[in-house]
Image (cartoon, grey):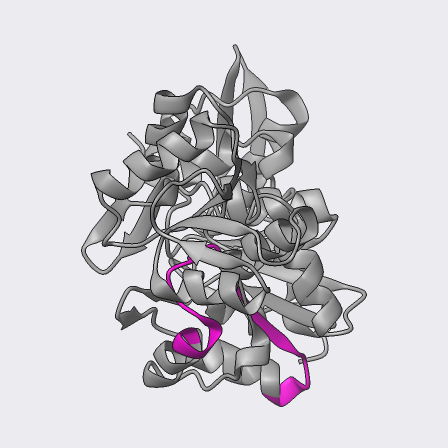
Amino acid sequence: MSDALLAAYDAVLFDLDGTVYHGSRVIPGAPEAVRAAREHGTPVRFVTNNASKAPAEVVDHLTGLGLPADAGEVHTSAQAGVQVLKDRLAPGAEVLVVGTESLAAEVREAGLKPVRENAPGVQAVVQGHSPDNTWAALAEACLAIRAGALWVACNVDATLPSERGLLPGNGSMVAALRTATDAVPVVAGKPEPLLFETAARSARAERPLVVGDRLDTDIAGAVAAGIDSLVVLSGVATPKQLIEAAPAERGTYVAEDLTALTCSAEDLKIGPRPGWTVEVRDDVLAVTGDGDDLDLLRALCHTAWETGVTELGDAAKARLGLA
């Protein structure tokens, strides 16, 4: 395992939704991959933008899916959001909570006072995902934000992966408030680097690896934190998105799922790949050769990122199922 991807890093920072599980369904191979990291002696951390559950609840969910963990290994955007509040507000300040009771508990544990209705004493609004968020809750937040309250969004994920498909995420609700207030929130979770930096410090890691399925949060957050990343295609990211990715959203490696952690790091790296030749012809990425489809994707990403050409030729489209 000396050449395995996980052996090249001193911690693995896993995203959850779309990377480890889809709602109540574990992604095949995830328990084995996490177990392999632990057996190798590589610390693992679970870094999630989902602010709806407390770390202990995340641990219960992971354990039920065959991935034993402890609360100290879990880092949530709710924790990051409350840290922003704690850094900016005086102890005891009133914070209007749009989110779950676990988010309100985080606010309370930080020495602040969670409330659910706007009043003259409200100094901040913290907004996190909850399936029970209502128009009435958004209306209270709207009034507070318009009155000048600090607005902290735990994350701005537009969608949330589930076993049924993509559902509205916290970012969709944040977008509604942005429209209603003409204000812009302070974003605490990914793609801001705070969550990954905190997780890496807790593992005493100097060379961590981020593993995630979203380019605009997981991978962008890794880039912002200066951390290498593995993009897995088990959630939101698609081959087309990868090829067209902006510099701030480009991963180091790409694979189908977490089982790649025990594969050779060199085989997973985005770059020229044996068996495939990618050239720019008439502003189109033309491919020749044969081999593994993911190797083709790695080679296409490399050339697209080097040249700025992202239009695929017919052969590449057919091979990647994009025709």
What residue is rendered at 36% in x and 22% in y? 179
Give 280 or 120, whichever is nearer the viewer: 120
What residue is rendered at 40% in x and 23% in y? 181
The x, y position of residue 44, in whole percent, is 60, 75
203 vs 210, left or right, is right
301 vs 10, left or right, is left
Q: How many marks can you see?
A: 0
Q: Quadrant of residue 169?
A: top left
Does 83 appear above or below 203? above
31 vs 206, left or right, is left
What residue is rendered at 23% in x and 54% in y? 132
> Is residue 44 on the magenta stretch?
yes
Q: Residue placed farthest to the right in the image?
A: 206
The x, y position of residue 126, in whole percent, is 47, 47
Residues drawn in magenta:
39-58
Give 127 or 279, whichever is nearer the viewer: 127
The N terminus lies in which quarter of the figure?
A: bottom right
The x, y position of residue 253, in whole percent, is 60, 52
Q: Residue placed farthest to the top in the image?
A: 282
The C terminus lies in which quarter of the figure?
A: top left
138 vs 1, left or right, is left
> Is residue 195 on the magenta stretch?
no
Give 113 or 159, whichever is nearer the viewer: 113
Kindly tell me whether residue 185 is visible in this rendering. Answer: yes
Q: Residue placed farthest to the bottom in the image?
A: 39
What residue is rendered at 28% in x and 64% in y? 23
Kindly tell me whether residue 252 is visible in this rendering. Answer: no
The x, y position of residue 32, in whole percent, is 45, 81
